[in-house]
Image (cartoon, coloured by chain):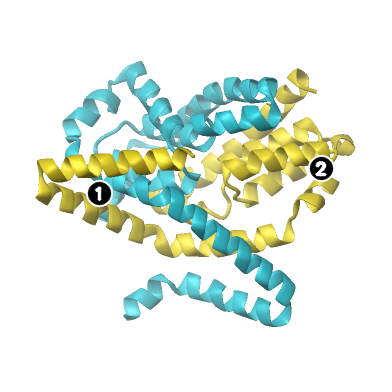
Amino acid sequence: MDSYIFYGLAIFLLIFSFVKDKKKTKMALMKAWKAFENILPEFLVVILLVGFLLAILNPETISKIIGAESGWFGIILAGIIGSITLIPGFVAFPTAAILLENGAGYMQIAAFLSTLMMVGIVTLPVEIKYFGKKISIIRNILAFFFSFIVAIIIGMVVA
Amino acid sequence: MKKIIKRYRGFLFVLAAMILLILFNQELGLKTLRITGNSVKEMLLVIPPIFLLLGLLDVWVPRETMIKYMGEGSGIKGVLLAIFIGSAAAGPLYGAFPVAAVFMKKGVKFMNILIFIGAWSTTKIPMFLFEIAALGNTFAITRLLIDIPGIIIIAFILSKMVSKKEVQALYENAASID
């Protein structure tokens, strides 16, 4: 749904820009394309790898290993699964709800969701391209550990 | 041509591996192919507007304006703007990196760029509504309340860990991309 809003906004601004200055608009389009083409090679690799990962890790498999009684082992495992997978949010949340129904624990789900959104192992090459190795790796490590803090607090508040 | 092959060699390698996978394990291979197809569809839905907007931002918004609102000395205003822009965005995290590159070109403060990345990754407003619907108010609100200080703290630690020189190198790299 929100992607349509963004399409609308982008198209509206593009028309507005075109009316105001054709040359600048052409330049903007060129820059947009260049920025896109710049990450396309990494992008394509990421998309194929994610397809493979998701083909192996289905909800039943995940649910089994991160049950409510799986404790810290389950939480860390959930964090690792979240770090290596890349699922769009509007799929991830309903999936998380299904996992909970199937017996996954709240803390495990919190760790999974948090790392899913903040840690990106497969997108690391893209990140490194813009932020360099040092920052990208440290950011992912910090986000990984932060996700356990999120899990602990969610565990205290929700469960 | 040679240059193109060199740039896309990683992709070609994975593609070849996938063709082998389909040959040896058809079920898993085709499932992978189907999920990849879905990802491509999703990508087409969210990616083009992000790049259009960043192209327009690059051309229309002057560097001085960006520096004033989000550069060195922009203070809390810059932090709030970084959180807001990141949270209002749509699309997966990798879409944020090219936008960050434009921010670097425009002289946005490094800490604010890191906050923007953090906000894009985890406090997205549209996603928040999904989260409430799927996991309930308590879960979603608790997570949001932890995440906002969390991304600021992570950005702070990161910005303290790199030297001015390293940041400058990144900014120069971002300027050379285009």
Residue found at x 43% / y 31%:
B88
Relative side of B74 to A77, left or right: left
Q: Quadrant of the C terminus of chain A?
A: top right
- Crowdedness of circle 1 by 10 Å Cα count: few (<14), some, many (20+)? some
Q: Which residue is mark 1?
A: B175
Which amino acid, mark 2? Ile
Q: Is residue B104 in view?
A: no
Callout 2 secondary element: loop
Which amino acid, mark 1? Ala
Residue found at x 38% / y 40%:
A6
Q: Is residue A74 above or below residue A60?
A: above
> Label 2 vs label 1: CA separation?
44 Å
Q: Nearer the viewer, residue B141 or A14?
A: A14
- Picture disc at residue A66: 2
Rendered location of residue A92, percent (x, y): 64, 43
- Crowdedness of circle 2 by 10 Å Cα count: few (<14), some, many (20+)? many
Please tell me the colour of chain B.
Answer: cyan
Rendered location of residue B125, percent (x, y): 50, 29
Rendered location of residue B60, percent (x, y): 18, 39
Instruction: Pinpoint the chain carrying mark 1.
Output: B
Rendered location of residue B109, percent (x, y): 32, 31
The yellow one among the chains is A
Instruction: Answer yes or no: are tags 2 and 1 on the same subunit.
Output: no
